[in-house]
Amino acid sequence: MLQPSSPPALITLRGVSKVYPGPAGGFTALSDVSLDVAEGGFVAVVGPSGCGKSTLLSLISGVDRPTRGEVMVGGTAVHALPERRLSEWRGRTVGIVFQFFQLLPTLTSAENVMLPMDFCGTWPVRERRGRAEALLERLGVADQADKLPSALSGGQQQRVAIARALANAPAVLLADEPTGNLDSRTSAAILELFASLSAEGQTVVMVTHEAAARTHASRTLEMADGRVVGDEAGVEVSEAVRG
Ligand code: ADP
């Protein structure tokens, strides 16, 4: 039997369509998308509003189910997971970063980062605080550990939110417009952070409007009308190949 020449992808979509029900017979948000994302990749998903970027993320995270097709993440058939297993699977496998950070306002940074560990019961209770502090350190905000989100800048809040998304060592980090609420300098720093996490082996899939994302991501997928219409290696990568 022939062996595949490259390792299996961490994320695989096969023939994925998503039709939202509606009065005129439904709206097709994703149309027959097939895709492989390698482990450790940093994929930017770009395209105009309404082209299906967030829908793609919600199918990878199991927040929503495809109308047709298969979504595999780390060998799990996400599209077929029973509802009762989905939230635990998601809590352990997927970290999600949002445009507006969505930190709990009454908890400190460290407590926000501990929350996913508490929910999923990952790591012994006595190790959770230390792990949260180590993640905040990695994200460059160790000195903000005991502050409430309201005392932090937008960039600091997003760093805490990324630390929280990494709390359970997820196979996949998903980000939906993570720089959409940040100034351009802070945005660049956050994109660099994702690139460095990816260089350490973290798989990252990021939806963005940010043109600069192409220079940080290892791969850019361009979407239009529910389809993937472009698939390019990152600028730095292709320059390195040319040079
Ligand atoms: P993007 O993230 O690229 O802006 P989305 O994935 O959010 O696009 O949406 C794709 C299309 O699907 C849009 O036209 C949007 O209005 C539609 N859509 C998204 N979610 C729903 C829903 N729950 N019900 C009906 N239509 C939806």
Image: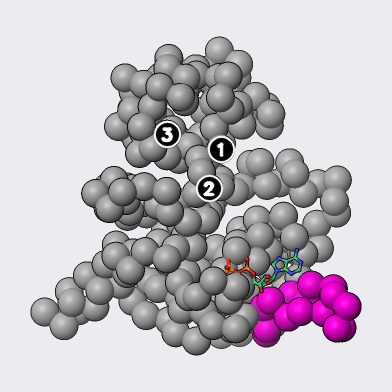
**In the drawing, what numbered circle is on residue 102?**
1
Tag 2–tag 1 contact (CB < 8 Å): yes
Q: Is residue 60 toward the left or the right of residue 105 in the image?
A: right
Which amino acid type is shown beneath numbered disc 1? Gln
Q: Residues within 10 Å of mark 1 (few under 14, many from 20)?
A: few
Q: Report x, y in % for residue 72.
A: 66, 66
What is the CA distance from the residue labelled 3 to the residue labelled 2? 11 Å
**Residue at x 30%, y 32% (from the top left corner):** 140
Left or right: where 210 falls relative to 226:
left
Q: Ligand 1 lies in which image quarter?
A: bottom right
Q: Secondary structure at mark 1?
A: loop
Q: Earlier in the sequence, mark 3 or mark 2?
A: 2
Label 1 to label 3, Cα distance in Å? 9 Å
Q: Is residue 169 above or below residue 71?
A: above
- Give the residues drawn in magenta, as a range: 16-32
- Using the image, determine if residue 211 lies above or below residue 89: below
Image quarter where the C terminus lies is bottom left
Query: Does 218 appear in magenta?
Result: no
Image mark for residue 157: 3
Quadrant in the picture for residue 20? bottom right
